[in-house]
Image: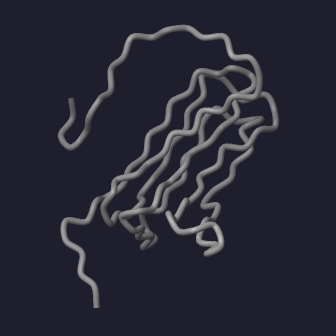
């Protein structure tokens, strides 16, 4: 295992879905963090016009309107997408969540990698 990484191992159990289920992995470090990169890879070209989205859930009440879309990419003709924010100073609060979503109606196997930096110290002014 690589330094500063962890693997979650679990026994696979096949499941037959009955409708429009969508997998929604979330990044929630619970500390001040900076988003660097997200990579989605499908086992084959998507084949259907479906968006891979990356959204910010700010942890604020819905009326505050702090939730925003950070990235949308149609995967119909692609098997991979990389969004790189490394040159941008995008910092997020400890109650923010980054939500990754892809409907995957063509049942592709897919993997998602997200790179981020956690802040060791935060200061308020």
The quadrant of the rendering that contains the C terminus is: bottom left
Q: Residue at x 61, y 75 (%)?
A: 64
- Asked whether, in this view, residue 122 is left or right of residue 59, the answer is left
Q: Nearer the viewer, residue 104 or 24?
A: 24
- The structure residue drawn at horizontal position 69% and vertical position 28%, both measured from the top left corner, is 21
Horizontal placement of 100 versus 125: left or right?
right
Residue 124 horizontal/vertical position (percent):
28, 85
**Which residue appears at 19% of the width and 65% of the height?**
120
Q: Quadrant of the N terminus?
A: top left
- For this orientation, the residue located farthest to the bottom is 125
Quadrant assignment, res 34? bottom left
Q: Position of residue 54 (x, y in %)?
A: 59, 52
Q: Position of residue 57 (x, y in %)?
A: 55, 59
Which residue lies at the image location 42% right of the left edge and 73% below the top edge? 89
Q: Is residue 14 above or below residue 65?
A: above
| Res. 15 image quadrant | top right
- Relative to 92, say whether 51 is above or below: above
Residue 16 horizontal/vertical position (percent): 66, 11
Residue 65 vs residue 85, the one in the foreground = 65
Please tell me whether residue 72 is drawn above or below residue 52 in the rendered image: below
């Amino acid at each position: 295992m690589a330094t500063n990484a962890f693997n979650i191992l679990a026994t696979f159990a096949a499941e037959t879905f009955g409708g429009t289920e969508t997998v929604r992995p979330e990044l929630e470090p619970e500390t001040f963090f900076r988003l660097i990169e997200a990579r989605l890879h499908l086992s084959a070209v998507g084949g259907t016009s479906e968006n891979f989205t990356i959204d910010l859930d700010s942890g604020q009440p819905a009326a505050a309107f702090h939730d925003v879309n950070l990235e949308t990419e149609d995967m119909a003709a692609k098997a991979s997408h990389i969004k790189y924010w490394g040159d941008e100073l995008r910092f997020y609060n400890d109650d923010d969540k980054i939500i990754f979503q892809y409907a995957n109606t063509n049942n592709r196997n897919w993997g998602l990698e997200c790179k981020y930096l956690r802040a060791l110290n935060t200061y308020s002014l």
